[in-house]
Image (spheres, rainbow, N blue to C red):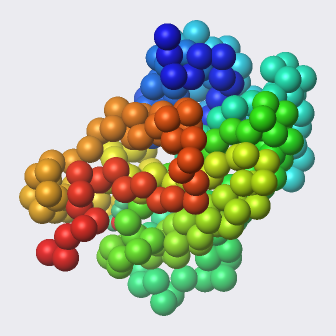
Amino acid sequence: MGLMDGKVAVVFGVANHRSIAWSIAQTLAREGATLAFCAQERMEPEVRKLANTIGSNEIYTCDVGNDLDVPSIFHQLGERHGGIDAVVHSLAFANREDISGKRFVEVSRDGFLLALDVSVYSLAFIAREAEPFLKARGGGSIVTLSYLGSERVVPNYNVMGVAKAALECSVRYLAYDLGLSQIRVNAISAGPQRTLSARAISGFQDIERIVNEHAPLRRNIDGMDLGNAALYLLSDLGKSVTGQVLHVDAGYSIMAL
Ligand code: 1JT
């Protein structure tokens, strides 16, 4: 018996086998969920390959920056499954120059708006379009991913820190709005993960080393830790938890030094 038996979960943000979204998808599949994936067109072949390994062949191509794609996907999901139970939002973007080297004070209007559009507005948009289909099943749960740079200054994280602060606040407002439909909305604030995005950033290795040395658990976290935390929030185990930011970071965020 799995914690997600009979539940349909929709996952945004798988790029490759290192993606946090992929760790979460594997955990949900192990617990009996039916998985559907939404990916940019250029990611589709890789995502299809990964999905097949967990018995899913449901891939929708989707650009969250396109106002028509997201509604169309939820419409198709509704037709196919009658509704959905869980949504994973593991999406973020910023221009390379806006999160490495340059000072935050130098960010352009376009760079600022792009980071907030892709990384924050997309959650509100997905939540709005998902609401009727989650409601159709008597409620549901939405999880997004954040990072400590929203609360503290992490050098170089810059505009993404501002975006993550807005994302965490959006979680609270969405939790209030969607609570009426018995839909929960939470974020996981993850310790540093060596994903495709993260590895591209200068200074990322220093952050990993500092966490390993200073976190209460004296180590970093892995994808399974994030999968298990997401499982808690997306399953009935977390049925009274909404509007929260759960730190899954080996305790690093409690430290001053
Ligand atoms: C994005 C990227 C969002 C990297 C991210 C992210 N959230 C966490 N990371 C890892 C990270 C990145 C930096 C950092 C510490 C951790 C890259 C692509 C855009 C979205 O500071 C040194 C920059």
Q: Is residue 202 above or below residue 65?
A: below
In the image, taking residue 217 as reference, residue 131 lies left or right, namely right
In the image, taking residue 204 as reference, residue 211 lies left or right, namely left
Tell how many labels. 0
The image shows residue 203 at horizontal and vertical percentages of 27, 64
Location of the C terminus by quadrant is: bottom left
Asked whether residue 46 is in view, the answer is no
The quarter of the displayed image where residue 9 is located: top right
Residue at 58% across, 10% down: 55
Residue at 52% across, 72% down: 165
Asked whether residue 219 is in view, the answer is yes
In the image, taking residue 217 as reference, residue 38 lies left or right, namely right
The image shows residue 121 at horizontal and vertical percentages of 71, 63
Answer with the quadrant where ligand 1 appears in the image: bottom left
The image shows residue 29 at horizontal and vertical percentages of 53, 19
Residue at 85% across, 23% down: 82
Residue in the foreground of this view, choosing between 51 and 255: 255
